[in-house]
Image: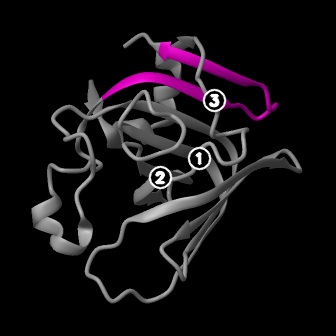
Amino acid sequence: MMNISDLLSPDTAHRWEEGSLELNPLTEEDALQEAQMLGLRFDAVAGVVGILFELRQALQLQEANTGVLVAYGVRELTWSGPARDAKLTAWSVGSSKPASKNGLFDLSLDMWPQPGARLAVTAERAAFFLGNVQGLLDAPPDYTEHDRAAVAGLVADWESLFETLNATFLNPDHRVSSGGATA
């Protein structure tokens, strides 16, 4: 097990061997549908962005409670979203659209509640890690009834201990490989 933030290191990819992933968010449209985006971490110096997902209510990828998409060699990162009345918002993915364009990985996420938000990432390569954060309940909390301190421990965060069950990688030559944990 490792902290989720450790997955943002480009060296992390070397810890995995061949395996299979039920549905690949790096290549298959709407693989992240109904997943909730919990956080975004951008390391400008390294050119790495991590997107943390809550999977307990996702339509796909139901074999784990947490997902982490990591993009390396980030060329573009865009977030647009409306002002919200609530302190906390569960941004659920309405659609996810991965693509390979001009030798780069593109991902577009459209989220709700309406009016929704949009996240777009363009990078040289990407990885998706599927796993579990121990101690989470069967369903995420109702964010409208809590503040940030109250949801701590009820959802994954960047410092949560993460047991990776599987991973998939989109390499610069656009070959996709999936792997199981070896660490």
Residue 61 belongs to the span the image colors magenta: no
Q: Position of residue 54 (x, y in %)?
A: 38, 48
Q: Compared to 131, does 109 lie above or below?
A: below
Q: Position of residue 175 (x, y in %)?
A: 78, 26
Q: Tag 3 or tag 2, which sits nearer the N-term?
A: 2
Left or right of residue 38: residue 142: left
- Residue lying furthest right in this view? 102
Q: Compared to 61, does 179 lie above or below?
A: above
Residue type marked 1: Ala
**Tag 3 secondary structure:** strand
Identify the residue position indicated by label 2 in the image.
Answer: 51
| Mark 1 Cα shell of 10 Å, populated few (<14), some (14-19), many (≥20) | many
Q: Position of residue 177 (x, y in %)?
A: 68, 21
Magenta residues, start to end? 163-180
Left or right of residue 24: residue 116: left
Q: Quadrant of the N terminus?
A: top left
| Front in this rendered view, residue 9 or 90 | 90
Q: Compared to 178, does 149 lie above or below?
A: below
Residue type marked 2: Ile
Residue at the image position 25 percent from the left and 68 percent from the top: 143
Identify the residue position indicated by label 3 in the image.
Answer: 169
